[in-house]
Amino acid sequence: MNNKFQFINLDESDKLTENDNSNEIIKEKDEQIIDIPISDKEEPILEVSIPEEKQPIFDNKEDKEIKNDTDNNFLNNKKTLKRKIHISFEARLLSMLFLIFILFLGACYFILKTINYGNDESITYNEKTNIYYEVCLNNEQECLDEGLEYDRNIIDKIDTSFDYTVEYSANVESNMSYYITAKTRVFDRNRLDEVLFQEEETLINNDNYTNIGKKVNLNETIEIDYNKYINKITPYLAKNVTELYGEIQISLFLKEGDDSREVSSLVIPLTGNSFHISKNVISNENQIIEVPSNEWNDSNINYAVIASILIVFCLIIVYRCARLVILVTTTRNSYQKTIQNILSEYDRLIVIARDGYESNEDKKIIKLNSFEELLKTREIIQKPIIYSRVNNIKSDFIVEDNEKLYKYTLKERN
């Protein structure tokens, strides 16, 4: 046979009804029931029911909805309260200004690279000239190679080839002018500064030679009638002056603007029974020339695109920087008014954490969508609301429970 004894608090015993002599009424939430089983063979075993930890009681439909929302937020938000680094207004402003400065410099650099269209560009080049000739005799059947000693009395003509080559480091549009002249002179060997006879004629003239590319090659062949030039100086040779000297100089000139320069020449003596032919050529390497850049190429397009992107980013950051300054410097904006209204209306429920608030324990964060939800949660949990100012445009309102932390964040919005 089992007997059941019920123990109640003394305070609750005063509330029993006098007419109820058969049963005693006890509040279930605070009662402790001890079951003492009676047996002939065993000692009594005490079974004590320990009251469970108190949970928030949701008395109406709205409270239950809040609980469901908070539980759903907990499932979607498995985060713990951690220390966050908040950047001050001054640091944010300085970093934005520095970034604007860097983007502005980069945009200016690429703009200059873009508008470099039409300006001169430095290009290196190598140029070289050469002259090839052979001396043909009067019998018209034999021609002698260059570099020999020739008999003036048996020479008929001299076939000459002028060659000019230039290689550039980049593609260049070459608009060149060149000409070849023959200069005949007679002078006294003892008085070289006194020319007795001089005549110059143009053998070839090309005023419009165009080439596009990295290499330019000019080649002109001339047949020199040796006896023709002998006849020109014969009247001076008849004076029997033994020291008279006559020659013909065949020269290739390049015309550059209003100036001309001689790039190669061939000197053929007209006096004496035998003679040698001499030639003057040039070989210039790693020379620099300023060439107009008259083409809008892919590089210019790339520079323009990069400059445009940098300008867009620069303007975006300028806008954000200006907006930040306006938000901070505005004395009574909507955000500040909302904060003041909340602190004034609910001052009895709010505790202000002036240096910011951080929980001593890692707790699960449940973010709420409105301050009203936080108020209802506070009514259920019966904990104070903690106000924590993050910066000039952001504040947190927090209600902390044993295992959870409910937070509503208010931000300035445009």
Image (spheres, rainbow, N blue to C red):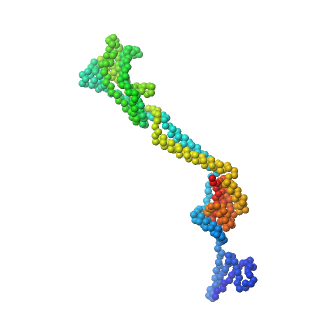
Q: Residue furthest top?
A: 239
| In the depicted structure, whether residue 2 falls above or below residue 386 | below
Q: Looking at the picture, how far across and down is residue 147, in whole percent?
A: 31, 25
Q: Residue at x 47, y 34 (%)?
A: 292
User: Could you tell me if residue 90 is visible in this image?
Assistant: no
The answer to which image quadrant residue 64 occupies is bottom right
| In the depicted structure, whether residue 338 falls above or below residue 48 | above
- Classify residue 121 as left or right of residue 90: left
Q: Which of 387/144 is in front?
A: 387
Q: Residue at x 69, y 63 (%)?
A: 384
Number of numbered labels in the structure image: 0
Q: Looking at the picture, how far across and down is residue 345, in whole percent?
A: 72, 60
Q: Which of 221/13 is in front?
A: 221
The image quadrant where one finds the N terminus is bottom right
The answer to which image quadrant residue 404 occupies is bottom right
Q: Residue at x 63, y 49 (%)?
A: 324
The answer to which image quadrant residue 140 occupies is top left
Q: Which of 54/258 is in front?
A: 258
- Classify residue 270 as left or right of residue 50: left
User: Could you tell me if residue 388 is visible in this image?
Assistant: yes
| In the depicted structure, whether residue 248 falls above or below residue 93 | above
Q: Looking at the picture, how far across and down is residue 243, in whole percent?
A: 35, 14
Q: Looking at the picture, how far across and down is residue 216, in whole percent?
A: 38, 33
| In the depicted structure, whether residue 165 falls above or below residue 318 | above
Q: Residue at x 66, y 65 (%)?
A: 377
